[in-house]
Amino acid sequence: MNWLRENWFDALLFVLLAAVVVAIVLFLVGVNPFARPPATATSPAQPPAAQAPAPEPAPSPAENPAPAPTEPAGSGGGEVTVLPLPPVGAGGAATEPASPARPSPTPAPAPVRPARPAPAAKGRYRVSVGAFTRPEYAVDLARKMEAAGYPVRIEVIGRVSRVVVGPYPSRAEAEAVAAKLKTYEPQVYKGDTPEPRGTYLQVAAFKDLARARDLAKELKDAGYPVAVYYRDGWAKVWVGPLSDDRLAETKGRLEEQGYQPVEVRGGQG
């Protein structure tokens, strides 16, 4: 005890130093001697059971009517509905869709007679802006009219391709358009596109007017009578009209060149 009395300061300093060392060691190993022990888990008191909501009444059939069936869109009347099956032409003008250059023999398709157009709607007027025996000229003008924003068709009258714009609901509107296009010597008429008359051989049909122009010019330069029928986005290249004695011979020549012409018969007389 005498030593403790005489060296109490050294002893106190030693105890404090030891406590610091112990604290450092506990800190490094992650032990906190002053942390409160976790409380014993107890299940929380169950809250009073909530009253289940009353079920909602099922909707009546009248509240959820069945969707009305949709009706298919109608097709335009009066257009020749022959589908093109020509292959790549002699001058490299591709058709849509393309076929092999020399297809295997198949039975000749039966002539197709286009449906007669429905009576023209009251107040439907069109403006003729040009008629050509050279079909490429008609296509060039049609493209020019479309670029200017006019709705365009190319009608076939015999061997003539006639370019028209319209329709317009009144003669006054059609005449106003004709006044803007007076350099083309326009003519206003009432009615729908007339039904082609006679027998033709459809060589190809295109969505692209430029391709129709190239093929029509190629066939025209080869000596065929050619017209272009353009309506509802399809430009159809026709050879004709042909008499019965020339029909088979012309069809054979076209087939030798790799095409598959389809016979198209319009109204006679």
Image: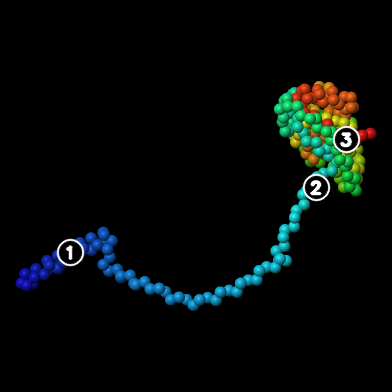
Q: Which of marks 1 and 3 is in front?
A: 3
Q: Distance between the residues labelled 3 and 2?
A: 22 Å
* Residue placed furthest toward the right: 269
* Mark 1 in CB contact with mark 3 (< 8 angstroms): no
Q: Quadrant of residue 69?
A: bottom right
Q: Is 145 above or below relative to 54?
A: above
Disc 1 is placed on an element classified as: helix
Circle 2 is placed at which residue position?
74
Number of numbered callouts drawn: 3
Q: Residues within 10 Å of mark 2 (few under 14, many from 20)?
A: few
**Colour scheme in use:** rainbow
Circle 1 is placed at which residue position?
18
Disc 2 is placed on an element classified as: loop
* Residue placed furthest toward the left: 2
User: Which of the two labelled residues, at mark 1 and mark 3, occupies the earlier sequence position?
Assistant: 1
Rendered location of residue 50, percent (x, y): 53, 75
Tag 2: amino acid: Gly
* Mark 2 in CB contact with mark 1 (< 8 angstroms): no
Q: Distance between the residues labelled 2 and 1?
A: 100 Å
Q: Is residue 144 in sight in this rendering?
A: no
- Residue at the image point whose x is 80% and y is 47% from the top: 74
Q: Is residue 25 in sight in this rendering?
A: yes
Q: Quadrant of residue 177?
A: top right
Rendered location of residue 162, percent (x, y): 86, 34
